Structure formats: C-alpha cells, structure tokens
Amino acid sequence: MGGMPKGLKDTAAHIERLETAFFKIGAAFSNHKEATPILELITRESLHCLRANRSTIFFMDPQNENLKAKYTHAVSPLHRQVGIVEERQIAQKALKEKKPFLLEGPEDFSDFFKYEERENKITSLMSIPLFCKGKGIGVLSVVLINERYRFDEKSLRSLSTFANFSSAALEMAGLFEEVQKWNSCRISYEQYLDKILNQLQGLSEREQQRINTHIVMVQAEGKVDEAEFLASKTNHTVPWIKGAIIPKGELGADRRKDERIEVTVHVEFDEEYWGITKDLSKGGAFVLTSDPMDLEDEFAIKLYVPDGQDPIAVSGKVIWTNKYGKENKNLRRGMGVRFLGLQGNEQARIEGFIKEYKAKNPVIKSKSQRLSP
C-alpha cells in the first residue's frame, strides 16, 4: 500500500481491522456459549476498529432502571472516568427512545448538558441500544476524548454491526440457558420416574393391581372428578356419567333378558379392587377392570348405586370374561357378573334406580323408528 493515497490507505486499514474483528467475534461465538467473553471481545474490538478512547457496554439495573457499566475498555487508565456521567446520561436516553445517538462534536452536546471547558473532555460520542427478545436491556457506547477527528455516519454503521453482535450474543446465551434449564428438568423428571418405577417394583401384586385398575378407570372416565371418586369410598356419593359405551355381546345371548341401562357405577370386589360397571341390570353388570377373574369364579361385590344409600353387598359370579382376549373400543378389558342371592329390597333399589335413570335419560329413537309413520 506504499503508493496508495492516504485516504485509500485509511479505508483499507479500516476494512482490515473490521475483517479481523469480525473473524475473532465469529470464532468466539463458536467457542463460547456464555455471553461474557463475547461481550468483552466486542467491547475491545469496537474500541480498536473505531479508534476510540473508550468503549463501554452498559446494562439496565432491574432494581432502579438505571444503566451501569458492565464492560469497559480504554486506551489509557486516565480515560476510564472522563465524562462517564454525561456518557451514561446519553446512553440512558438512547435506550429509552430505542434509537442510536451520534454526537459528532461539542456543538451536538448542548441538547443534553452544558459542555464545560475541561482539561479532559469527550469530543465525540456514539450510543446504540442493545436488545434481547425484543426488549431493550443495554447500550454499546464509544467516545473520543480530546481528539481532533470525529465519529461520522460511517462510524455509526460500523458500531451498529458490533451492537448487533452484542444482541446476538445475549440472545444465544439466553437460549443456551433455557436449554440447560429444560435439560435439568428432564434429568430431574427421569430421576423421579426411575424412583417411582423402583418403588412400584417393590409393591405387592395386589397393590400393583389396584394401581392398574385405577389407571383403567381414569382412562375410561375422563370426566369423573378424582376428589369425588376418592370421597365415594367413605360417603357412598358415587359420581357417575351417562352415555357410556356398552361392549357388544359381553354377557352372552341372555344379556337382553333383564332391563338394563348404559351407566357408570363404581363397584368394589375381592375386598381390595375397584372397578366400573358399564352395563347394569337387576340381574348383573359388566365390570370394567384391568384384571378380570376367571370364568365361574364367585366373589363378594359391593355395588355403589348413586342413590345416597349404603352400597349393596351381594355375591357375584363371572359368566363372561375378557381376561386374555384382545381389547378394543368395543370389547374392553373386564368381566360379566351375575348377581347371586340378591335380596328383595336390594333388587328393588336397583330396579328403582334403573327406572329413574331411564326416565331422566330417555333413549333416542333410531333413524328407522323416526322415519316410520
């Protein structure tokens, strides 16, 4: 560049400084996931590229909304505090108005403060706000102190690039922090899940069956309130939902002999397990459970008819079971139970409940019935 005019030499040197600075900053993005080393580098390189005397990154203090200098580089220790109060004042205004400020010379400072004659003073200044997630959080500022040359629009464009790098570093650090946070949550969740699985493995077969049955009930009845269901064990006010789907053919050829309804009623059997009836008549019911009993098994059953009275205790016999068959939406895991030794008053309760339920929930006629004269 020996024979190059001075203006071109200065331009070429400036471009070379910028290329070197951008290469260093790009490498810092690759090597660091935290913002601090990148912002420190940006502060130092903006000072060097713009031939400034001091370069500073201010951040907003969330407690009092005032700016505080976070990263500062100066050519000389004597320049670190020169005009810092005035510089912070202009940076505060740039952040508030969300726009850059270029004060080329002393004549531009009169809108902000009285420019006094001092031995050491700021002669040119640029301030550009920094954003993260669309919110202004800081300012990148550079100053000239006791210099004859000034910053110009070209200088402002160069500083804007450094400000963009700063905002990108803050965004990247925020994203990495979110990733770490969710990764920590995932690890905690997996540890918690492993702990639960280990505890479940230590449960007895009966306790595991109670949990499995409860899961089946929750899956079948998403509208049943959990608190009401737990309370039903003690106060017998069992929640139930109309309109449940009846598995087709589960009670064999005689399933239409007795008047029956599609209704959900909770039952307790074998002293421990809880299930749900999905098809109730005075002679029996279909019990939805994850562990049906074998065909011909007889057992004690409590039927929690939702009429405000004590549960009906009766013997039951399995006349149909889907213990090992394939389960689908029309054939749920469960068993058909016939009531044995049902007392007259208990049978009357069931019949009364069925009639009352049918009166309140009339069956909608089929399409063929609606079309017939």
Image: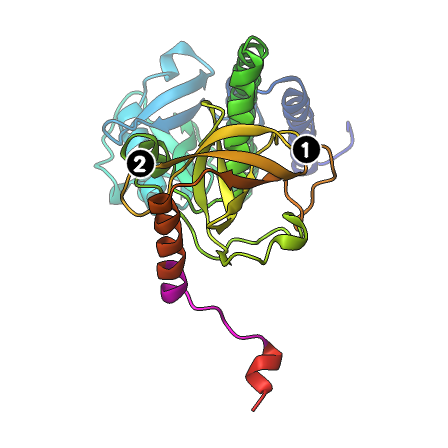
Q: Quadrant of residue 321?
A: top right
Q: Quadrant of residue 219?
A: top right
Q: Which residues are magenta?
A: 357-366
Q: Return the residue found at the far bottom.
A: 373
Residue 222 visible here = yes
In the displayed structure, would residue 90 be above or below residue 257?
above
Does the magenta run of residues contain 179?
A: no
What residue lies at 25% left-to-right and 35% top-to-bottom?
Answer: 115
Does the magenta run of residues contain 363?
A: yes
Q: Specify whether 47 is left or right of 31.
A: left
What residue lies at 50% left-to-right and 31% top-to-bottom?
Answer: 214
Q: Give the spatial CA distance, label 1 vs label 2.
A: 74 Å
Q: Return the residue found at the far top.
A: 202
Residue designated by label 2:
92
Q: Position of residue 108 (x, y in %)?
A: 33, 43
User: Which of 275/137 is in front?
Assistant: 275
